[in-house]
């Protein structure tokens, strides 16, 4: 175990040992069961890879070979039931044997390689297993384990391998989107951090930027949070580096040793070194680290010239302090997970999803975990880009609705909008991330009526995974969005969550009834009010990433995923007028798709403040190429061949005299041919799009950045067998749904039986293992060749 984790808690190790014992007991139980029962059947999709979204050749079909009966098949065994509040007839018919193929599949023996994506959400942990040679995929959804998310990951891996008949030893790569870094900040459970600053700048974190949120009167109610490195744990180094990197005052090493020795008595668990102008010359920071290594053995030390070598001392210091604050916790988590995975999967490579949608090695993630703060949401955006590209769509609004929150993002030309600042709670760091906007609206969001206003509210409080919505039957009693969907008939009782969890409509009704009594509304009107309010909340978030950024949402398709996303997607498409609404196959595990199919990535940056007239194409290009070489070296260490690497430049620009900056992306080839002139044109165009005007003023470079990434995953979407447009073979029940104050007859379909070209007319409900899709009256969903359900108005 490295120095970063020597301060790890015994509790974490105990949890891992308990998980191992649980898995061992589970394995023994399964072995006993297998000795008494016939071999279990597994689920897989047989197909050929689908190379281009424009192809229509469907000569090779994709089959579904279920490990367990699908929802449709289970529902066909059930008696007809009655929809909530209205009499209805549920028609059931069992498909003939030819409509489903069930075969016994032997456990794999190491002849094929598999990639595994694992995404941890607030309520569920999603697992995706892909066979690299054929592109076959298997999914699993298990409850998250908030106290130790690695237990949920290991549970999911066990389940998906058992269902697929795959040996753990066959998995060569594990890609993991984690919320450990985020949760450490949100719960204030990080390390005790010491800070070394330049003499005279001891209060750099206290002074900050003197910004008070909330408008002119915000200071009245603003409670400033305490810095993560408190003043009593901050010491000063007598030194000074100039703005151009020159040494103005040498480092006083003797005085520094005395201050560090005194600090060592304060019980710090991580140390940050952030000196003035170290972005221009990091020599003093490196020397301070060398001295500190001898005084703080086993303590992780982060220096700002490595974490974020950019101008502005407050942002640089804050970012590096956050890195130190979460580093012991994240390092312990990754090391223990990696050790357990290696014990089960010899030779496995673990990668962690970064906030910008790329992959980092386990070692890089442990050293700079500040780049993981938005790891979770980034997986969904990456997955949306991948699946939509297979279908021929590149301009997208992504809509990821889970159990606790909803994340939205804008994607143009297949590239997600990015930002250079990442904010979690009261902490803002200088780190690249996908521009994901979050709102506290999820399936578990709690509805309530304040006594003072008597106005219905939904969220941001959530029932989470424990106890969850009332419909889960796990002790939850408060009304949630999921309960409202059950009452309205959008989430039928046959739609088992994760393929296993039954829905209790009676408990959902009892919970929603409390809203009706408080507001004097009927049961169904109360439920529809809950759904309408949560839809408006998510509509506002989608406007933030589109309309308020100068984009017309009518020019974008809406990709909906997450466990609850497809239930609300059609309504959001109507509000945004964004068509088609794309429901990918396996929408509840799309984040895991993103984890498994994204690319290894690294970046290098340098502050370079020059007006265009003060520099040249050659000088700027030389620095960019140097930065690209530095980032490429990281991928070299990961075994990514130079021929598989691609580079793009990202340059922060502003008009001379401005404080605000915009990031312009340009390829090396375009910069070499067009230089600063081409860069300036792109900046003017972006400025005009955002602010409706461009200035006739000199432009100024601010930060140069090179981003290098590996080749894309070979996994491709797979083609469905073509149908005749009639989805009747997938129909398994009739029900009632409540929409716009009226009951409507709705058909329920099993998505596993839908074929390419089938058209599902609303009102309809399409169920699958990990999610449920609602097609509203007046809309029709069509299955495309790769299995996406494309919903459009009639």
Image (tube, helix red, strand yellow):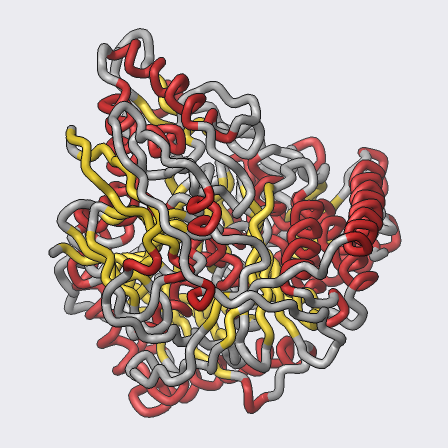
Question: Up-down: is 783 above or below 588?
Answer: below
Residue 125, position in %: x, y? 58, 48
- Residue 606 in view in this figure: yes
**Relative side of 547 to 46, left or right:** left
Residue 554, position in %: x, y? 16, 58
Q: In which quarter of the image is the C terminus?
A: bottom left
Quadrant of res 218: top left
Q: How many marks?
A: 0
**Relative side of 426 to 571, left or right:** right
Question: Up-down: is 468 above or below 418?
Answer: above
- Residue 311 in view in this figure: no
Tell me what residue is drawn at x 78 percent, y 39 percent: 268
Question: Up-down: is 164 above or below 320?
Answer: below
**Relative side of 26 to 721, left or right:** right
Residue 256, position in %: x, y? 78, 48
Tell me what residue is drawn at x 70 percent, y 57 percent: 366
Depth check: give the residue in front, 522 or 631: 522
Tell me what residue is drawn at x 37 percent, y 72 percent: 786
Depth check: give the residue in front, 94 or 438: 94
Q: Quadrant of the N terminus?
A: bottom right
Depth check: give the residue in front, 733 or 132: 733
Q: Which residue lies furthest to the top in this view?
A: 452
Tell me what residue is drawn at x 30 percent, y 61 percent: 789
Residue 89, position in %: x, y? 28, 36
Quadrant of res 53: bottom left
């Amino acid at each position: 175990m490295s120095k970063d984790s020597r301060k790890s808690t015994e509790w974490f190790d105990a949890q891992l040992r308990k998980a191992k014992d649980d898995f061992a007991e589970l394995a023994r139980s399964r072995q006993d069961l297998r000795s008494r029962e016939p071999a279990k059947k597994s689920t897989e999709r047989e197909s050929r890879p689908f190379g281009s979204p424009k192809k229509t050749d469907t000569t090779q079909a994709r089959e579904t070979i279920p490990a367990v009966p699908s929802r449709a098949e289970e529902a066909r065994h059930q008696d007809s039931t009655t929809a909530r509040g209205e009499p209805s007839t549920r028609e059931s018919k069992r498909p003939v044997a030819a409509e489903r193929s069930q075969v016994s599949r032997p456990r794999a023996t190491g002849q094929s390689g598999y990639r595994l994506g694992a995404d941890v959400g607030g309520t569920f942990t999603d697992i995706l297993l892909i066979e690299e040679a054929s592109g076959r995929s298997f999914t699993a959804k298990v409850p998250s384990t908030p106290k130790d998310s690695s237990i949920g990951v290991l549970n999911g891996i066990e389940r998906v391998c058992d269902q697929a008949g795959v040996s753990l030893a066959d998995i060569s790569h594990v890609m993991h989107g984690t919320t450990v870094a985020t949760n450490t900040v949100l719960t204030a459970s990080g390390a005790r951090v010491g800070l070394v600053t330049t003499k005279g700048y001891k209060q750099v974190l206290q002074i900050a930027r003197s910004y008070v949120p909330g408008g002119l009167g915000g200071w009245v109610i603003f409670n400033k949070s305490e810095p993560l490195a408190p003043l009593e744990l901050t010491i000063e180094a007598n030194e000074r580096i100039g703005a151009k990197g020159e040494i103005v005052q040498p480092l006083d090493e003797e005085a520094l040793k005395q201050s560090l020795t005194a600090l060592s008595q304060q019980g710090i668990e991580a140390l940050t070194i952030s000196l003035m102008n170290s972005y221009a010359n990091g020599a003093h920071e490196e020397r301070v680290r060398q001295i500190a290594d001898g005084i703080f053995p086993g303590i992780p030390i982060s220096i700002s010239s490595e974490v974020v070598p950019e101008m502005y001392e407050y942002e640089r210091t804050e970012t590096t302090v956050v890195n130190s604050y979460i580093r012991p916790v994240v390092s312990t988590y990754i090391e223990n997970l990696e050790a357990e995975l290696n014990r089960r999967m010899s030779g496995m490579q673990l990668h962690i999803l970064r906030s910008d949608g790329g992959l980092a090695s386990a070692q890089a993630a442990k050293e700079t975990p500040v780049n993981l703060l938005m790891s979770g949401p980034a997986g969904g955006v990456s997955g949306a880009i991948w699946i939509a590209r297979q279908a021929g769509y590149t301009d997208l609004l992504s809509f990821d609705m889970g159990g606790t929150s909803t994340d939205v993002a804008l994607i143009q030309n297949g590239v997600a909008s990015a930002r250079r600042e990442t904010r979690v709670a009261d902490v803002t760091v200088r780190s690249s991330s996908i521009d994901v906007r979050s709102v506290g609206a999820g399936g578990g969001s709690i509805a309530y009526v304040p006594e003072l206003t008597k106005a219905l509210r939904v969220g941001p409080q959530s029932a989470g995974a424990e106890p969850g919505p009332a419909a889960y039957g796990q002790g939850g009693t408060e009304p949630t969005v999921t309960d409202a969907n059950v009452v309205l008939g959008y989430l039928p009782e046959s739609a088992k969550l994760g393929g296993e969890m039954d829905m209790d409509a009676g408990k959902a009704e009892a919970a929603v009834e409390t809203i009706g009594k408080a507001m004097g509304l009927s049961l169904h009107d109360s439920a529809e009010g809950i759904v309408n309010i949560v839809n408006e909340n998510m509509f506002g978030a989608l406007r933030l990433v589109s309309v308020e950024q100068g984009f017309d949402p009518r020019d974008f398709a809406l990709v909906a995923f997450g466990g609850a996303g497809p239930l609300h997607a059609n309504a959001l498409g109507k509000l945004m007028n964004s068509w088609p609404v794309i429901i990918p196959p396996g929408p509840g595990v799309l984040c895991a798709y993103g984890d498994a199919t994204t690319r290894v990535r690294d970046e290098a940056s340098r502050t370079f403040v020059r007006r265009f007239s003060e520099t040249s194409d050659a000088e700027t290009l030389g620095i960019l190429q140097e930065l690209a070489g530095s980032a490429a070296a990281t991928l070299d260490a990961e075994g990514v061949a130079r021929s598989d690497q691609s580079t793009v430049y990202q340059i922060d620009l502003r008009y001379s005299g401005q404080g605000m900056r915009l990031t312009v992306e340009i390829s090396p080839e375009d910069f070499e041919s067009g230089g600063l002139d081409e860069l300036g044109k792109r900046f003017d165009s972006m400025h005009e799009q955002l602010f409706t005007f461009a200035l006739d003023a000199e432009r100024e470079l601010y930060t140069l950045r090179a981003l290098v990434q590996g080749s894309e995953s070979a996994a491709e979407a797979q083609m469905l067998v073509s149908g005749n447009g009639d989805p009747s073979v997938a129909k398994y029940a009739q029900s009632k749904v409540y929409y716009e104050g009226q009951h409507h007859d709705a058909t329920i379909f099993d998505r596993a039986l839908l074929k390419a070209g089938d058209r599902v007319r609303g009102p309809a409900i399409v169920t699958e293992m990990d999610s449920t899709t609602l097609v509203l009256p007046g809309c029709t969903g069509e299955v495309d060749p790769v299995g996406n359900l494309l919903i459009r108005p009639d």
